[in-house]
Amino acid sequence: TPAPVVVKREDVITSDPFNNVTDHIFEKIGTNLHKRPDHPLGIIKSVIESYFDEKYGKDVFTSYDDLYPVVSTYANFDSVLVPPDHVSRSQNDTYYVDNDTVLRCHTSAHQLEMLKEGARKFLVTGDVYRRDSIDATHFPVFHQMEGFRVFEPQEWEEAGKESVDLAAEELKDCLEGLARHLFGDVEMRWVDAYFPFTEPSFELEIFFKGEWLEVLGCGVTEMKILEEAGLGDKRAWAFGLGLERLAMVLFDIPDIRLFWSDDKRFSKQFKEGMFKAGGVDMQKFKPYSKYPPCLKDVSFWLPKEGDTFTENNLCEVVRDVAGSLVEEVKLIDEFTNPKKGLTSNCYRIVYRSMERSLTDDEINALQEKVREDMVSKLGVELR
Ligand code: PHE
């Protein structure tokens, strides 16, 4: 599925009652940071792709990096066996274009489609979208890479193993090699995990700069997915990883919003081919001085009924008003008045620009708009 050249606003922000895509999100679609060779995300992507070329032979794994991020709920959830009542399906967690269409929340949305198109060993890189809280490591758009490998019956017969064991062993061997390719000679451990689309499932953690860090999720693909693709006699593994997370630790990038920055002081520091495993002998990101933050607190009573107020909804309101000028939204106080049966929250909003100093006037205006929208969209009562 080649990506349309232009993404039209009316195709993504619809009048459907399910629609919860904001302009701030729409503007990110099609940016394709992962396709820029000199961008840290593009650099990590190509380092991983070259690992697969080295390990399995050139182009044995086919790379896809321009699959359209607007997908059906079937592709995003059902095709990978996400149960009907799973939280990730809620409008609080996922961006819906309409009842049957979402902005993909993981690259796993493409597994079944690619299998049906005949792909057997492939990597899919793309932008994924999740409604989430706001801080230095969370942004509603980020990038994932998915890996998928199908095994033929003769492969486990020749190895004299159960198919699931062969797949799990080869998966771990592949990903331990990938972790060394990225992080150098590090300690690693496998942790049992759960994903609806794999069984068994694992997470790989590495010990880097004094702490255990989760780097990816993976597992042996549920047979139901292969059967759906007409591959019921085969076995497969899959993995998924977040490129921002890897790039932040490998290059010492302190804030996830920097990936979206046009500031030359950021972009100048990255060049195709600069990467060295573990960052040894590699120039890391040199932070330039940050502009000062501007803090605003807002206290309010939660609505007595309904679920219009959630932290994710608040973050969306703030992001829709302030875009990437918002650095963090955090709960700093909460109490319940038993007599009134009401709960009060106080949130601190940290505004900061990556490229300039903010003025009091502009932040006061933004904060005023945030307060109005909190009342009209979230039903809170300001204190
Ligand atoms: N899709 C999973 C996530 O977003 C990652 C994953 C991919 C896990 C493939 C297992 C297999 O967290």
Image (cartoon, rainbow, N blue to C red):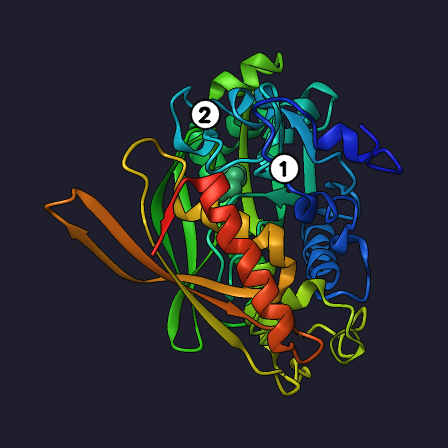
Residue drawn 53% across the image and 54% down it: 370
Location of mark 2 (residue): 82
Rounded to the nearest whole Å, what is the CA distance between mark 1 and mark 2? 22 Å
Question: Which residue is at the far left?
Answer: 339
| Residue 76, horizontal then vertical, whole percent | 57, 28
Q: Position of residue 218 (x, y in %)?
A: 48, 42
**Quadrant in the picture for the C terminus:** bottom left
Q: Position of residue 136 (x, y in %)?
A: 51, 66
- Foreground pick, 218 / 154: 218
Q: Is residue 229 above or below residue 131?
A: above
Residue 240 versus residue 170: which sits nearer the camera?
A: 240
**Quick one: SS at disc 2?**
loop
The answer to whether 341 is drawn above or below residue 284 in the figure is above
Q: Amino acid at mark 2?
A: Val
The amino acid beneath tag 1 is Val
User: Quick one: 6 or 179, which is closer to the camera?
Assistant: 6
- Residue at 57% in and 39% down: 106
Count of residue discs: 2
Task: Tell me the quarter of the picture where residue 351 sits.
Answer: bottom right
Residue 160 seen in render:
no
| Label 2 crowd bin: few (<14), some (14–19), many (20+), radius 10 Å | some
Looking at this view, is 173 or 292 the one in front? 292
The residue under label 1 is 21
